[in-house]
Amino acid sequence: MPGKECTYPEGASWVSYPRIIPRSEHSLSRKEVWPEALKVIRRLSKFGYTAYLVGGGVRDLLLGRRPKDFDVATDATPEEVRKLFGNSRIIGRRFRLVHVYFKGGRIVEVSTFRRAPEPHELESMEDPRMANNFFGSPHQDVMRRDFTINALFYNPGDFTVIDYVGGWDDLRRRVIRSIGEPRARFAEDPVRMTRAVEFASRLGFTLHSQVEEAIREEGWRISRASPERLKEEVLGILLSGASGRAVKLMAELGLFQHLFPHSSEVILPYLQDVVNLLVKADGSLNREAPHAPAQFLSLLFLPRIKAAKPFGGRVTLGEVMEEVFVVTEFLREDLPLPAHLLHSTRELLLGLWRVVKGPRARGARRFRERNYFRAALDLFKVDTLAFKEDRSLLEPWMEEVRRRRKPPYRNHPRRR
Ligand code: ATP
Ligand code: MG
């Protein structure tokens, strides 16, 4: 049994792996799993394949949290999965998997158990991107995942949780531990470092000391990751609900300056204020609203701009705009953000000074009609929460909003 060779985690050599946790010992209830994911597993099993739930879905349910989505791992190849589900599609090149689409918009991601390629296989490979597409056993699959808490399987057939790497104990101890040697795993894929920080912040876990040490030493490698993936990671962290904690932790570990090599210069000197704002935003902004990414990005820069152009000071909007452009230019150099996102970030930042100038100032009417108007007011509220700024500045604007919300006069009763 390959699982028996696993001597992980340290100090628990009496446990033989895989460890099967029966239904009576865990709190994961099948009722909380999307019926769509169960349907996929049932159909794969019916055709003789092994299929488990894996990843964040299992982790979150064991923690009593609501998962974002559910992933399935199976020994069926992507082509075989594709054949079993009419409503499915093979996606990805670097990492081929199948998306199964359901009515109502849910998508279940099905990936085939993978293994690390042997050195000779790597050498003879024409396209190095295919290194992620060697198929293997459930145990091999687990060994190439990132952290132990992300590597638990749930088998809905017999309600057991299957643990090859000590993830079950780590969930209870609330630690983020790499599978294998963290430095090597981070060198292999540097994005795992930001993932470690995001999980620790979002779940309120601590980083295992070796993970922490490895991030301090290997953090520089993050700049080698693809800019597209980094952009996704940064936005994911900002919208995680724990952006304040994550930014603080990244700064402490020295990861932040590698992730934002240019913007750090205008963010880190104001770190405490930035974290303070993000914490308030985590607790008060709607993270699903269209302007949320721009709102969180703006907060990274707000303390610096306020230091240069205080709210109460005699500054013109033109001067603020100049400052906004200077700092967001750093952001543009750091991440390949779409132009519209950079644009709304700038508009929101400038919007805060428009709020301060009041509804009678020049350009106020146009501002009120912009689609980011509400987003700017909400951002101003975050600032008042964080720094006890003068909330009365918001009142005349809120009055406007209330007035505009009155139902329009209708000549005819609405048809039912
Ligand atoms: P989230 O709640 O953010 O979706 P998640 O753990 O489900 O968390 P995903 O990005 O959806 O994260 O990935 C699903 C699973 O794939 C992870 O749980 C992990 O097992 C594996 N995984 C994802 N990214 C990596 C990576 N960079 N290296 C190794 N394994 C990874
Ligand atoms: Mg997930």
Image (cartoon, rainbow, N blue to C red):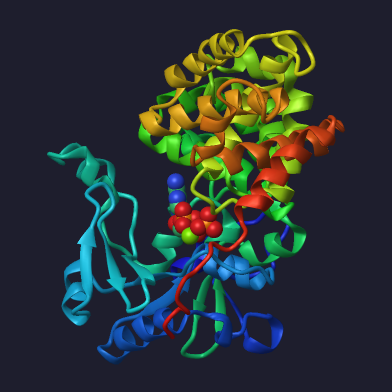
Residue at point 77% right, 11% down?
313
Q: Position of residue 219 (x, y in %)?
A: 56, 26
- Does residue 189 sit above or below 61 in this rendering? above
Residue at point 60% right, 17% down?
264
Q: Position of residue 360 (x, y in %)?
A: 67, 26
- Does residue 365 sit above or below 232 in this rendering? above
Residue at point 71% right, 21% down?
303
Count of residue discs: 0
The C terminus lies in which quarter of the figure? bottom left
Q: Position of residue 188 (x, y in %)?
A: 42, 37
Q: Within the image, what quadrant is residue 358 found in?
A: top right
Q: Nearer the viewer, residue 355 or 92?
A: 355
Is residue 185 visible in this depiction of the protein?
no
Is residue 108 visible in this depiction of the protein?
yes
The N terminus lies in which quarter of the figure? bottom left
Q: Nearer the viewer, residue 414 or 269?
A: 414
Q: Position of residue 381 (x, y in %)?
A: 74, 39
Residue at point 47% right, 34% down?
190
